[in-house]
Amino acid sequence: MLQFLLADVMRSLHILAGAAWVGGSVVYLVVIVPALRASKAGPAVAAELGALFRRLVGVCMVTLLVTGVFLIVDRLSAESVGPAYVAILAVKIVVSLTMMVLAILQAQEARRLVSHRGRLWSQAPRWILFLGIVAFVLGATLTGLFEVNIVR
């Protein structure tokens, strides 16, 4: 019972952290950035919003790493996991780690002067969002595969 409760808490935290990061990315790219441009807000406002969002992303990344490792061990120890599950899990891990590396590089780019920021500055947020959506789809696929194998 305790193992089930712990696994349920870890899954919930994993989903919440992913939702906060991916949902926050949607809001940031679709709402906040256009609003900042339309309002001609000063660079200080944009920098503060960026710093706050980077803090949220940092918490999400730590949460996703801790819960992800737990969930990997938990699921791979189950007898019902097959090769398709392992293959999709491997792809999800690569996608998720790529997302995190891009976020770390983006945070480093944010420390540079605006005039010295490279192409990564403008492209990384879109790639992070895309990869986050892919990770969610892969996660849903993994859940479906796991549940189907349990029923059999």
Image (spheres, helix red, strand yellow):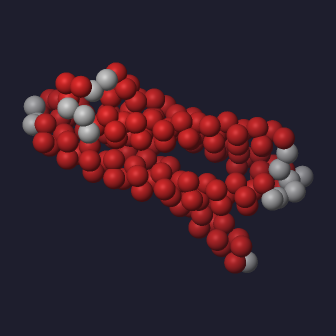
Horizontally, is 33 left or right of 84 in the view? left
Q: Extreme right residue here?
A: 152
Q: Extreme top residue here?
A: 119
Residue 122 visible to the viewer: no
Identify the residue at image location x=37%, y=45%. Answer: 24
Residue 41 visible to the viewer: yes
Horizontally, is 41 left or right of 96 in the view? left
Number of marks in picture: 0
Give the image quarter of residue 117: top left
Identify the residue at image location x=71%, y=71%. Answer: 4
Identify the residue at image location x=37%, y=26%. Answer: 120
- 149 and 124: which is toward the camera: 124
- 60 and 4: which is toward the camera: 60
Identify the residue at image location x=65%, y=61%. Answer: 70
Above/below status of 75 relative to 8: above
- Residue 144 lies, in percent from the top left, at 73, 46
- Residue 133 lies, in percent from the top left, at 52, 36
Give the image quarter of residue 1: bottom right
Above/below status of 9 relative to 120: below
Above/below status of 79 relative to 2: above
Horizontally, is 10 left or right of 90 in the view? left
- Residue 103 lies, in percent from the top left, at 42, 40
Horizontally, is 43 left or right of 18 in the view? left
- Residue 77 lies, in percent from the top left, at 81, 59
